[in-house]
């Protein structure tokens, strides 16, 4: 039984120590190693077929590479099997992966190729000289990786089912101008809390509130994820959904998907914004943003029109929450059953 009651009507929020205790912070980092991490999109590998994944290393401590050869993609260890050197920190176009330390080479499948100066070494090479391969999953060209994988199809099933109508991989382009990398003076849990509710929108995001019908904001809970649906006000931009979509006929401005513990996939009419959460310390969080475009003509309008402004507004309140968590007068609050089911769902998962 966790510290948060399963009945939101009776439940109190997480104790403030979840946001302030360094030892508890360290213990909770295991969740990032046990879940699927976002890697990249296939379109990014068109120019460079070997890509280091530093954001996954920052989340899990494990250096990884995305390797694409003849359309086949693999997530490989980014560590040389000779002396543990990092193989590369830069994306590159190559036919082999060569260690910059002593020249050991590997194929794009991770298999050992050659090593100078090892003549006469007995029982060499063996399978241990190949690069380790991590479990990976792909949907519409989006790659995911895991150290301790659960079944990818099961984990991603709610998204796959709901977004089956979304454009295919060939329609997606990576927009480097939308890349952002922010550090926030707050615990990562506070950032996720804020993401998981639209309760604050009228009070924090004036421009966003003008595009969304707050009274019709929707939240759906899944095993390991939460979906929030922003409904557009009359006349505001929204998806043109096909008839086979479960949401056909609704004026949907945005789908906000969160996957435990720290991945957000925000789907707008212009494309997808990916938020990657990296806990740095008990009171500091790094958030990396990537933008993948499906319709250039819809950039800059609607709920996904000015994400930089929304993000800065969110950072202000999240850092304010972190300051408040250190107060001797605060420990726990209560949930709004109408507006904070996503936060409650997250807290129940975390406290178990």
Image: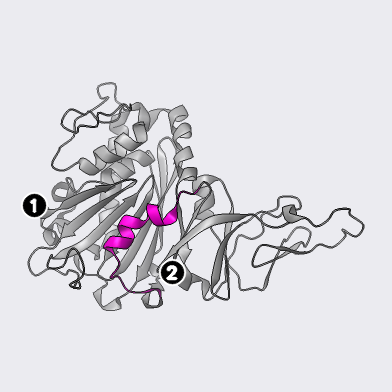
At which x and y percent is residue 27?
47, 32
Q: Which mark is residue 141?
A: 2
Could you say which is closer to the camera, residue 342 or residue 206? 342
Label 1 Cα neighbours within 10 Å, binned few <14 / some 14-19 / many ≥20: few
The residue at the point 79 percent across, 59 percent down is: 102
Q: Which residue is pictured at 22% across the width and 61% down the height?
A: 254
Q: For the residues carrying marks 1 and 2, which lies nearer the camera in this image?
A: 2
- Residue with the most extreme right position: 120
Image vertical order of residue 328 relative to residue 111, above or below: above
349 sits to left or right of 63: left
Is residue 186 at least partly visible in the picture? no
User: Where the C terminus falls, by quadrant?
Assistant: top left
Q: How is the image coloured?
A: one colour
Measure how far apart labels 1 and 2 are at the Cα level: 35 Å
Mark 1 vs 2: CB contact within 8 A: no
Q: Is residue 28 magenta?
A: no
Image-based side of 62 in relation to 279, left or right: right
In the image, residue 51 sits, relative to residue 34, either above or below, namely below
Per the image, is 168 magenta? yes
Residue 347: quadrant of the picture: top left
Residue 83 to residue 306: above or below: above
Query: What is the quadrant of the N terminus in the image?
Result: top left
Q: Position of residue 122 (x, y in %)?
A: 89, 53
Identify the residue position indicated by label 1 in the image.
215
Image spot of residue 258 (x, y percent)? 32, 51
SS assignment at label 1: helix
- Mark earlier in primary sequence (1, 2): 2
Q: Kindly indicate the quadrant of the structure image that contains residue 339.
A: top left
Numbered disc 2: secondary structure? loop
Over which residues does the magenta segment extend?
Answer: 149-169
59 or 7: nearer the viewer: 7
């Amino acid at each position: 039984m966790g510290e948060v009651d399963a009945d939101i009507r009776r439940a109190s929020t997480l104790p403030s120590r979840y946001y302030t205790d360094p030892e508890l912070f360290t213990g909770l980092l295991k969740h990032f190693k046990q879940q699927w991490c976002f890697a990249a999109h296939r379109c990014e590998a068109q120019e460079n077929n070997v890509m280091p994944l530093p954001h996954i290393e920052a989340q899990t401590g494990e250096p990884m590479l995305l390797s694409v050869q003849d359309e086949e993609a693999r997530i490989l260890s980014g560590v040389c099997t000779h002396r543990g050197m990092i193989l590369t920190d830069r994306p590159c176009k190559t036919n082999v992966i060569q260690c910059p330390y002593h020249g050991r080479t590997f194929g794009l499948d991770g298999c050992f190729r050659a090593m100078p100066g090892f003549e006469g070494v007995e029982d060499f090479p063996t399978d241990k000289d190949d690069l380790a391969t991590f479990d990976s999953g792909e949907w519409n060209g989006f790659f995911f990786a895991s150290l301790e994988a659960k079944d990818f199809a099961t984990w991603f099933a709610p998204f796959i089912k709901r977004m089956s109508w979304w454009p295919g991989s060939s329609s997606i382009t990576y927009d480097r101008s939308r890349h952002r990398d922010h550090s926030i003076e707050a615990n990562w849990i506070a950032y996720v809390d804020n993401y998981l509710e639209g309760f604050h929108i009228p009070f924090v995001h004036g421009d966003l509130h003008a595009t969304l019908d707050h009274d019709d904001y929707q939240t759906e809970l899944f095993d390991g994820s939460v979906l929030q649906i922003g409904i557009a006000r009359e006349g505001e931009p929204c998806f043109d959904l096909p008839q086979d979509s479960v949401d056909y006929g609704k004026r949907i401005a945005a789908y906000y998907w969160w996957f435990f513990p720290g991945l957000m996939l925000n789907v707008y009419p212009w494309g997808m914004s990916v938020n990657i959460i990296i806990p740095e310390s008990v009171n500091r969080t790094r958030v990396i943003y990537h933008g993948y475009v499906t319709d250039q003509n819809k950039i800059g309008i609607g709920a996904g029109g000015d994400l930089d402004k929304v993000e800065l507004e969110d950072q202000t309140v999240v850092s304010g929450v972190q300051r408040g968590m250190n107060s001797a007068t605060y420990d726990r609050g209560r949930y709004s059953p109408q507006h904070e089911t996503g936060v409650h769902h997250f807290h129940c998962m975390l406290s178990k």
